[in-house]
Image (tube, coloured by chain):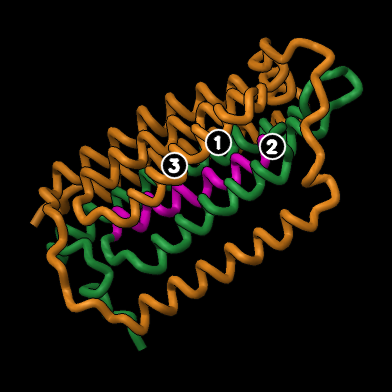
Chain colours: A orange, B green
Amino acid sequence: MPAFLFWTFALLMLVFGAGVIVTRNPVASALNLVVSFLGLAALFMSLNAYFIGIIQVLVYAGAVMVLFLFIIMLLNLRAEQARRINWLASAGGIAVALALLIQIFFVAGHLKSGRQTFPPLTASAIDDVRNVGALLFSKYNLPFQIIGVLVLVATIGVVFLSKREPR
Amino acid sequence: MVTLGDYLIVSGILFAIGFAGVMLRRNLIIILMSLELMLNAANLSLVAFSRFRVQSTGLPDYNAQVFVFFIITVAAAEVAVGLAILVALFRARQTTDVKDISSLKF
């Protein structure tokens, strides 16, 4: 992938990701999140992870986003009113996030393999659905079944939680 | 050329954005969205490492991609349960602001 495409999509993802946390309107945040996830899916594609990129678009930009927008609609949330901001708490939050960022920069900058470019693939990775699926059903068969149980439990839990109790 | 470190730094910035969202925002829906950003930042670094470790077959390390697949599944389940709890909370308290939900505050 050309470097300018990587930086375009990375910048797109980061700018709209920042948009999620700076906008006051929850609907605007949800739409910013969609664009951020689309940029992320493009980055996955650039890493030859086509299956993960498509799953990202389907699950996040599709299902999760519809869920968020439906909840915002059902609860009829409006933009939150500007409350008195607790400056001390906000400064503390920003300081902790900045410390984390500096730490990540430090670790990634000093990683020995961090300055190497990606080695070229000698085989075609275009059929990675088959490879991921084969691994999923052989080596990771038990975790896959456990994930299935987890999704079932989550479904039952959601139905139970959102059921209105009779009075 | 794009290096592994570039991907890791982009993923780190995205994680920090999500972290700042959890720390600074008071709307529970935005906090859930920020959690999603953090999970996706972790996914990006996992996929970058997967592409970096080219196997002897000439393909990326697909173990990491299976792991990312599991993370995406768990994150989707987590969002569904989290939003259901949010709806139950809104019914009981008519608010999604974490400042109004302080009954467990010491």
x, y (%) of residue A162?
Answer: 24, 47
Question: Which mark, by number, is residue A7?
Answer: 1
- Mark positioned earlier in the residue sequence (2 or 3): 2
- Considering only vertical position in the picture, is A24 above or below B59? below
Q: Residue at x 80, y 19 (%)?
A: A121
Local SS, label 3 = helix
Amino acid at the residue labelled 2: Ala
Instruction: Give the extent of the magenta segment.
Output: B28-48
Amino acid at the residue labelled 1: Trp
Chain for numbered disc 3: B
> Which residue matches tag 3?
B77
- Contact (CB < 8 A) between labels 2 and 3? no
Using residue A127 as the reference point, say whether residue B10 is left or right of it.
Answer: left
Chain for numbered disc 1: A
Chain for numbered disc 2: B
Closer to viewer: mark 3 or mark 1: 1
Q: Residue at x 26, y 53 (%)?
A: A23
**Residue A153 in sight from this viewpoint:** no
